[in-house]
Amino acid sequence: MNRTVTAVLFVAGMSTTAAAQKPPPFAMPARGFTATLSNTTPLVFGMGIDEAQRALGTPLTYVSGRPGNEVFLTFRDIGGSGLFPHHDRLYLQFRKGRLAGWKGDWGQNWMWQ
């Protein structure tokens, strides 16, 4: 008798639907190639000096050049090992007041010389 009651309760429990999360759709949206890159600097060719400062979240320091065709420098804090902070230099070239290019400079670490 106990076995039949247990079997009936087991079958009744199996026939009810579970209130779990919905299964994911079959076609997952593909992430773009640029979303997987580690270089996610939000710079775009043609942006102005103020736009570049806002995008990077750091102030730009004048290095050289005539008005409108300047080179600026900013220091990006991209973390580090936890023991030593890591600040990378980023040079930005502006021509006619618009961003024409940028270059990261990792330089030499003075501690390992």
Image (cartoon, rainbow, N blue to C red):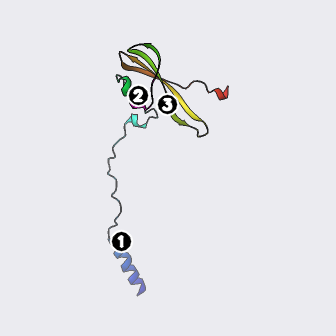
> Residue 20, percent across and down?
36, 63
Rendered-image quadrant of the C terminus = top right
Q: Secondary structure at mark 1?
A: helix
- Magenta segment boundaries in residue numbering: 53-60
Would you say residue 32 is visible in this rendering? Answer: yes
Where is residue 112? Give x, y as percent.
66, 28
Toward the right, the furthest residue is 113
Q: Look at the image and tell me in which quarter the N terminus lies.
A: bottom left
- Which of discs 2 and 1 lies nearer the camera? The answer is 2
Q: Which mark is residue 53?
A: 2
Q: Vertically, is 61 above or below 19?
A: above
Q: Is residue 42 visible?
A: no
The single residue placed furthest to the top in the displayed view is 66
| Residue type at tag 3 | Arg
Q: Nearer the viewer, residue 51 or 113?
A: 51
At a point 61% along the width and 39% down the height, the residue shown is 83
CA gap, disc 2 and disc 1 = 60 Å
The numbered dot on residue 14 is 1
Q: Quadrant of residue 29?
A: top left
Q: Secondary structure at mark 3?
A: strand
Identify the residue shown where x is 37% and y is 37%: 32
Q: For the image shown, how many numbered marks are present on the structure?
A: 3
Instruction: Give x and y (percent) for residue 52.
Output: 39, 27
- Mark closest to the chain's N terminus, 2 or 1: 1
